[in-house]
Image (cartoon, rainbow, N blue to C red):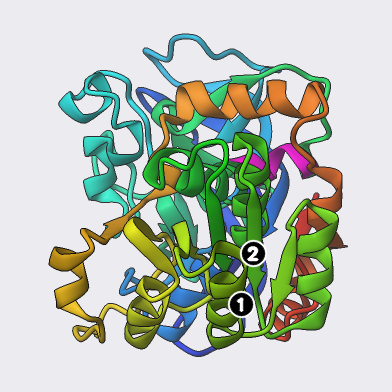
Amino acid sequence: MKTRAAVLWDRNQDWSVEEIELDPPKAGEVLVAVGGSGVCHSDEHVVTGDLPTAVPIIGGHEGAGTVEETGPGVTGLAPGDRVIFSFVPSCGQCRACASGMGSLCELGMYMREGRQVSDHTARHHARGQDLGLMCLLGTFAGHTVVSQASCVKIEDDLPLDLACLLGCGVVTGWGAVAYAGEARAGDVVVVVGVGGVGINAVQGAVAVGAEYVVAVDPVAFKRDKALEFGATHAVASSQQAAALLTELTRGRMAQVCVNTMGVGDGDQIGASLALVGKRGRVVVTNLHPAAETRVTMSALDLTTFEKQVRGSLFGSSNPRADIPRMLELHRSGKLKLAGLRTRTYRLDQINAGFDDMRKGRNLRGVITF
């Protein structure tokens, strides 16, 4: 079949919206009509080359849609089912999944390859070439073919252009605080960077009962949004946060600091370590450029204060359990979704959506179909 998709043909270029050829699903795969896709900074990392995924590639990894066709051997999904894509496949059977580490499913080893996990070939084609898929999904397209391992079935009570946000930003931010950061009631939590992931780290900190939630972002619009979503304080820099935390905690500082800036910075690791106190955890959930190999920090603090730096992918979550769980929290009023979606765009407006993201105009922009 033919569909339209946003393709990145080379680094540091605009997304090209054009017609592509889409093969039918093979064994273990499904054809999905995409209903909504978030504009996430991770796709920008592909554009800049910070994330060395092969091109040409169809972008998009934060999506939701409706199953239209299933390939042989698909179980648990049928035409008409609504699904949220898990940007990391979650097979539920490998050692990582069976050990409770669904965000590190062993099928994730194929993500940079961008081909189908079943046979490592492409279903998407344009200009006589095979196309890769961002996170094995390619949600910047009207239709896509993906592995059933990337689909989490949901009910039909939420519009797809809101449901899509659970495919990355919501679970990543929430889990970075609650799971990787192990924040507890009464803790002090700092969130450095209030975008589509950081705003949900704020929501996660509020939900676990943090005493203070300090949001750090240079953009006034995002600081204001952080306060709307429950942050107790919002400041423009880590230096301001350090002074504020010293006053609020009498020098004990925070228990958890989550780094959710658009682009990770080696110097920020040290700055964030300075924001936490004894046994404080710095959770790195934003992506750093692949070429960055140096971090500035006080290694002495790791020993003398038992501070920790932790990495977190997809919020250290179990997508098959946590995506439905987040939906339940939304239904009960404990998780805000509608306010996350600042602007919507048609597919042919995708470059405007990325420009708004770069300029800090959105918490999350969403492509609607």
Residue 123 visible, this angle:
no
**Is the stretch drawn in magenta largely helix, strand or loop?**
helix
Using the rendered image of the protein, determine whether residue 78 is visible from the camera's viewpoint.
yes
Q: Is residue 11 left or right of residue 359?
A: left
Determine whether the residue tagged by mark 1 lies in a helix, strand or loop: loop
Which sits earlier in the primary sequence, circle 2 or circle 1?
1
Residue for point 29% across, 47% down: 121
- Of residue 125 and residue 205, the one placed in the foreground of this image is 205
Q: Residue at point 34% right, 76% down? A: 269
| Marks 2, 1: nearer the viewer | 2
Percent x, y for residue 138? 53, 53
Tags 2 and 1 in contact by the CB under 8 Å rule? no
Quadrant of residue 188 within the rendered picture: bottom right
Question: Which quadrant would residue 29 be assigned to in this image?
Answer: top left
Residue that mark 1 sits on? 15
Report the amino acid beneath label 2. Val
Residue closest to the eye, 276 or 117 = 276
Q: Is residue 237 magenta?
A: no
Residue 140 rendering spot, x and y as whole percentages? 63, 57
- For label 2, count other residues whose C-alpha is less than 10 Å away and answer few (under 14), some (14-19) or many (20+): many
Location of residue 85 by image quarter: top right
| Tag shown at residue 214 | 2
Which label was assigned to residue 157? none
Q: Where's residue 263, x and y in %?
A: 47, 79
Which range is magenta? 162-166
Type of amino acid under label 1? Trp
Q: Secondary structure at mark 2?
A: strand
